[in-house]
Image (cartoon, rainbow, N blue to C red):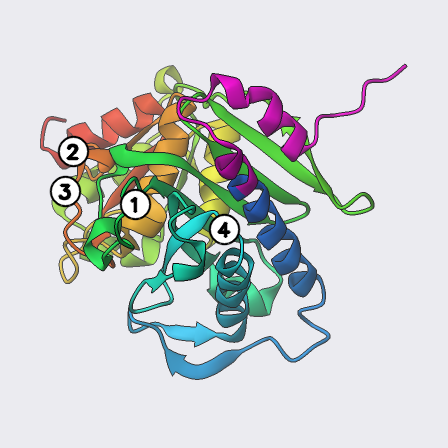
C-alpha cells in the first residue's frame, strides 16, 4: 500500500523531541503559520475577482506604496496570532511599531517578526508572491517584551521560513536542524511533506538581481556581474538571469537548484533595500541550514548587529561557492 505523505502537524510532532527546547506551543505556532498561508492563498486565488487588487493610497513605514493585499496579508497574521496564546509580540514590515499581546502573556513564549506579503508589486500581474517569518524566544515572565527586545541578531532565531504562493502554495521552514518543505494539498486542506532535508547545491548556474540598478552599484559588484556573463565552460559560465521581483520565489529557486541572489548596496542607498529582521535574517537562517551562505558582501548576515526594527541591509545569498566568489569581488580580492 502506498504510504500517505506526512502532514505538517504530524511531521512537527514526530520531530519535536529532537528540537532543542521544543514545546507544544512551538509546534502549534508553526501550524498557525500554515493556517495564515491557507487564508492568504485563498484570497490570492480570487484576487482578480474581488476588490483586493491595486493600492490603498497610503504608504507603509518604509515609505513604500501599500497594496490592498499587503493590508489583507498583514491582518491575517495579526488575527491568527492575536488569540493563539503562543506569541506575546508581533512585528511586521508593514507596521511602524510592534504589537504586544497581553492576552497571550505570560504563557506565550515567542515573538514573531514577518513580512506578510513579499513581492507585492507582483499582485496585479498574477506572478509569484510570498511571506517570510522569523521566530524569537522570549523568556521573561515578569513583563511583556519592549520594542527593543525584538531587535536581535539573526543567530538568536529559533525558527524561520517562508510561504510561497506560486503554481502551488508551499511552507518551508527550519528550526536549526535542516530545512523541510511542505506543499498545500487544496483538496485536503493539509500541507504535505514534499521536500525533506533540502540541500542547496554548492554552486549554481543562475543569478537573480534587479539589473536596472547596475549603474548605482559599487565597482566590485559591477565587476562580479560582468564576470558572471563571460563564457567559460570550465567554471560553468555564463550564468543565466532569473529574477521574479519576489525575494521568496527567487531564493526558493536557488534553494532547489543552486545559484545566487543579490540586492547589494547602491551609491544612493549603501545599506541596501531589504530589511534585516523581516527578510535577510530569516532567509539567511533557512539557506545556511540547507548548506548555503548569506552575506552583506563583507560579513555574515546573521551576525550583523541589529540596531533598529526596520533596519536595511545588503543581501547576497545562495550557493556557498557563488556567494564566496561574489564576496571576493566586492572586497577587491578578485
Residue at 27% x, 35% y: name it. 156
Closest to the observer: 274 or 232?
Answer: 274
Q: Residue furthest right?
A: 1
Q: Is residue 123 visible?
A: yes
Task: Measure the C-alpha gap from mark 3 to mark 2.
Answer: 11 Å
Q: Position of residue 255 (x, y in %)?
A: 47, 31
Q: Which residues are magenta?
A: 1-28
* Lower sequence index among marks 1 and 3: 1
Residue at 35% x, 61% y: name it. 100
Q: Is residue 243 visible?
A: no
Q: Position of residue 28 (x, y in %)?
A: 56, 40
Q: Which residue is mark 1?
A: 141
Describe the element under mark 4 as helix, strand or loop: loop
* Mark 1 crowdedness (10 Å alpha carbons): few <14, some 14-19, many ≥20: few
Residue 17 sits inside the magenta stretch: yes
Describe the element under mark 1 as helix, strand or loop: loop
Describe the element under mark 2 as helix, strand or loop: loop
* Lower sequence index among marks 4 and 2: 4
Closest to the observer: 232 or 282?
Answer: 282
Residue at 23% x, 58% y: name it. 147
Task: Measure the C-alpha gap from mark 1 to mark 2.
Answer: 35 Å
- Asked if the residue under mark 3 is in contact with the one under mark 1, i.e. CB atoms within 8 Å, the reply is no
Q: Which residue is mark 2?
A: 299
Residue 305's label in the rendered image is: 3
Comparing labels 1 and 2, the label whose residue is closer to the camera? 1
Task: Measure the C-alpha gap from mark 4 to mark 2.
Answer: 37 Å
Which part of the image, by quadrant, shows the C terminus? Answer: top left
Describe the element under mark 3 as helix, strand or loop: loop
Q: 42 left or right of 289?
A: right
Amino acid at each position: 500500500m502506498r504510504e500517505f505523505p506526512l502532514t505538517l502537524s504530524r511531521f512537527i510532532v514526530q520531530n519535536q523531541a529532537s528540537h532543542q527546547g521544543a514545546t507544544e506551543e512551538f509546534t502549534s505556532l508553526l501550524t498557525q503559520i500554515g493556517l495564515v498561508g491557507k487564508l492568504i492563498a485563498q484570497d490570492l486565488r480570487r484576487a482578480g475577482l474581488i476588490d483586493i487588487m491595486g493600492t490603498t493610497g497610503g504608504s507603509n513605514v518604509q515609505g513604500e506604496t501599500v497594496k490592498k493585499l499587503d493590508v489583507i496579508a498583514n491582518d491575517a497574521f495579526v488575527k491568527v496570532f492575536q488569540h493563539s496564546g503562543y506569541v506575546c509580540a508581533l512585528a511586521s514590515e508593514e507596521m511602524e511599531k510592534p504589537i504586544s499581546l497581553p492576552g497571550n502573556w505570560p504563557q506565550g513564549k515567542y515573538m514573531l517578526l514577518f513580512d506578510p506579503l513579499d513581492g507585492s508589486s507582483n499582485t496585479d500581474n498574477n506572478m509569484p508572491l510570498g511571506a517570510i517569518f522569523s521566530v524569537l524566544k522570549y523568556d521573561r515572565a515578569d513583563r511583556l517584551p519592549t520594542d527593543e527586545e525584538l531587535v536581535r541578531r539573526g543567530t538568536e532565531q529559533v525558527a524561520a521560513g517562508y510561504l510561497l504562493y506560486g503554481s502551488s502554495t508551499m511552507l518551508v521552514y527550519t528550526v536549526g536542524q535542516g530545512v523541510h518543505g511542505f506543499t498545500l494539498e487544496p483538496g485536503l486542506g493539509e500541507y504535505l511533506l514534499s521536500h525533506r532535508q533540502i540541500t542547496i547545491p554548492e554552486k549554481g548556474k543562475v543569478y537573480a538581481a534587479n539589473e536596472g540598478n547596475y549603474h548605482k552599484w559599487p565597482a566590485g559588484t559591477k565587476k562580479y556581474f560582468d564576470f558572471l556573463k563571460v563564457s567559460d565552460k570550465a567554471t560553468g559560465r555564463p550564468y543565466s538571469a532569473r529574477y521574479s521581483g519576489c525575494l521568496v520565489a527567487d531564493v526558493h529557486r536557488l534553494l532547489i537548484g543552486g545559484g545566487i541572489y543579490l540586492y547589494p548596496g547602491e551609491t544612493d542607498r549603501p545599506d541596501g533595500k531589504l530589511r534585516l529582521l523581516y527578510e535577510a535574517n530569516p532567509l539567511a537562517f533557512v539557506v545556511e541550514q540547507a548548506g548555503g551562505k548569506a552575506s552583506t558582501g563583507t560579513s555574515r548576515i546573521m551576525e550583523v548587529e541589529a540596531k533598529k526594527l526596520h533596519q536595511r541591509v545588503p543581501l547576497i545569498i545562495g550557493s556557498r561557492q557563488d556567494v564566496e566568489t561574489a564576496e571576493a569581488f566586492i572586497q577587491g580580492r578578485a
